[in-house]
Amino acid sequence: MKTFAVVFATAGGAGYAPLAPGTFGSLVGLVIYLATRHSPVAWQLGLLGAITVIGVWAATVAERHFGEEDPGPVVVDEVAGQMATLVLTGVGVTGALIGFGLFRVLDVVKPRPVDRLERLPRGYGIMGDDLMAGLYGNLLLQAAVRVFPGVL
């Protein structure tokens, strides 16, 4: 189970990218969104929920494996945060790329209370801040869809 947890937490190895592993994790979330965007909303939300729940567990196991808090190779949080940014928006490729950029900025800047959520213990902190950044990104993207209907 430890091997599965580490593979899941690193998004199949995307977290081992030598530069910007979080960006590669976000790309995994983007690809999952694009592959499932025509699926029923309940299925998309269920997938995000499953990635989140398994991600909390996997990130906790991976934290022990790597021997540090919020280790760089753990990017399942970026996968979930990116998906949270895009789910329920109905955007196409252009909108998804804008959502990708929004999430990356929010993940780096960490506006309140995003910055506080990373203080939660173990996998909860690892996942929590990115999910909140994803929620902020989703709200901004939803607003953009309403301002620029048909464009995104």
Image (spheres, helix red, strand yellow):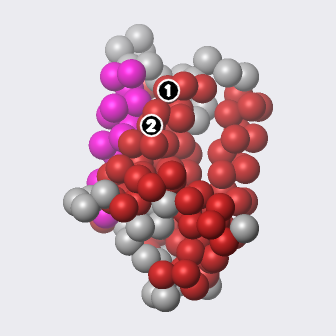
Residue topped by disc 1: 34
- Determine whether, in the image, residue 144 is placed left or right of residue 136: left
The local secondary structure at tag 2 comes to helix
Residue topped by disc 2: 30
Residue at 49% x, 42% y is: 29
Judged by its main secondary structure, the magenta piece is helix
Residue type beneath disc 2: Leu
Residue at 41% x, 53% y is: 14
Name the quadrant containing residue 59.
Answer: bottom right
Q: Is 147 contained in the magenta span?
A: no
Q: Where is residue 40 in the image (x, y as percent from the top left)?
A: 72, 22
The local secondary structure at tag 1 comes to helix
Q: Where is residue 44 in the image (x, y as percent from the top left)?
A: 68, 33
Residue type beneath disc 1: Leu
Q: Position of residue 116 (x, y in %)?
A: 49, 78
Q: Answer yes or no: is residue 96 visible.
A: yes
Residue at 66% x, 71% y is: 2
- How crowded is the residue under tag 2: few (<14 C-alpha within 10 Å), some, or many (20+)? many
Q: Which mark is residue 145?
A: none
Residues at circles 2 and 1 in contact by the CB criterion of under 8 Å: yes
Which quadrant is the C terminus positioned in? top left
- How crowded is the residue under tag 1: few (<14 C-alpha within 10 Å), some, or many (20+)? some
Part of the protein shown in magenta: 93-108
Q: Position of residue 69 (x, y in %)?
A: 48, 85
Q: Residue lying farthest bottom?
A: 67
Q: Is 106 contained in the magenta span?
A: yes
Q: Answer yes or no: is residue 78 visible.
A: no
Which quadrant is the N terminus positioned in? bottom right
